[in-house]
Image (cartoon, rainbow, N blue to C red):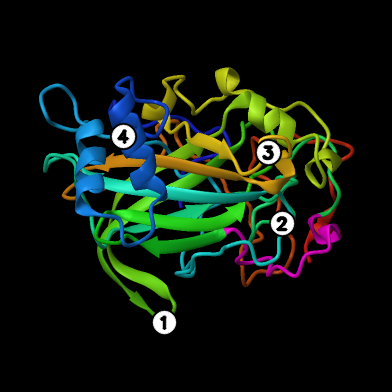
Amino acid sequence: MTGSHKEKTITRRRAIAVTGGTVAAGGLAVAGYQAAFADDTTTTAVADASASASSTSGGQCVLMSSVTEGPYYLDGALVRKDITEGKNGVPLTLRITVQDTTDSCAPVAGAAVEIWHCDAWGYYSGYTTANPGGSAPAESEDGSTADDKTYLRGYQVANANGVVKFETIFPGWYTPRTCHIHVKVHTGGEKEDGTYEGGKVNFTGQLFFDDDIAAEIFTLEPYSQHSGSYTKLADDMVYEDNGAAGGLLTLKAVHKKDPSKGYKGSIILGIDPDAESTGAGSGGGGTPPSGSPGDAPTGTPPSDAPTDSASPSASASS
């Protein structure tokens, strides 16, 4: 595993990531959103309209920007739709559509999309003693039934339209990062023993959230118990300030007057199925926490992570 808590952008391959609401042409925007949130039986016509929406004027897609995987990646995530494991937070339904940038934006059926992110207080499974910055309760105090080695991590395999769906929660934050979800796209492997094995990683990236929506979410329980200085998109060290092309999700509230009811998030990722992504950062890396699954619960933050007198102690591991 490479990269550091000071995650730096690596391959700056500019991209189009089309979601409902981000395409100028109204009809195509609607088609893109419908494709992202359609059931597994989405029609070919809708999928084709979405593909057209994410093409350039020359009819070819452009690669998504690839960035570092960060210090909190773990191998062996489970293939599953619901990755919450009972973790408390605002519900998030995430739809990701994978398209082939070398083949007129055709859907990449069978692509394995892997995501992982922190919980409402900024903790990652497998690294629950790593300080999220600011002041937060210990990870073990949230009252969930989650396994602290596997929560908020998982794979889904794309259907014929290149679509996967995850049920999760809105991520919290940790210093010095903005709210985000990590993502990898794999091809050529297969499901085995409940996880995904073999093949190669074609894309490593991160998905981001609108500042205003995140700010509203963070006033709610349990997020509000984590106090401190939250990093906005414009100040984040990874987000490129280029909207959907840089991984910014399109978000739609389930209930307009009650954000606690949850959100639907969507995005289309353009990849090159023949390419391979290392997930390495360009900044020279760093030391990830040592408290990985199977180790004693003595994990420490990366060497460049902030220290805070109010941070959880080593007893935070559950």
Mark 1 belongs to which amino acid? Answer: Asp
Measure the C-alpha gap from mark 4 to mark 3: 24 Å
Residue holding disc 1: 193
Q: In the structure shown, which secondary structural element does the residue marked by tag 2 occupy?
A: loop
Mark 3 belongs to which amino acid? Answer: Trp
Q: Percent x, y for residue 207? A: 48, 38
Within-10-Å neighbours for mark 3: few <14, some 14–19, many 20+: many
Measure the C-alpha gap from mark 2 to mark 3: 14 Å
Q: Would you place residue 293 above or below residue 306 in this image? A: below
- Residue range in magenta is 139-152
Q: Earlier in the sequence, mark 4 or mark 1?
A: 4
Residue holding disc 3: 173
* Image depth: mark 2 or mark 3 in front: 3
Check residue 151 for magenta coloring.
Answer: yes
Mark 2 belongs to which amino acid? Answer: Thr
Q: In the structure shown, which secondary structural element does the residue marked by tag 3 occupy?
A: loop
Measure the C-alpha gap from mark 4 to mark 1: 31 Å
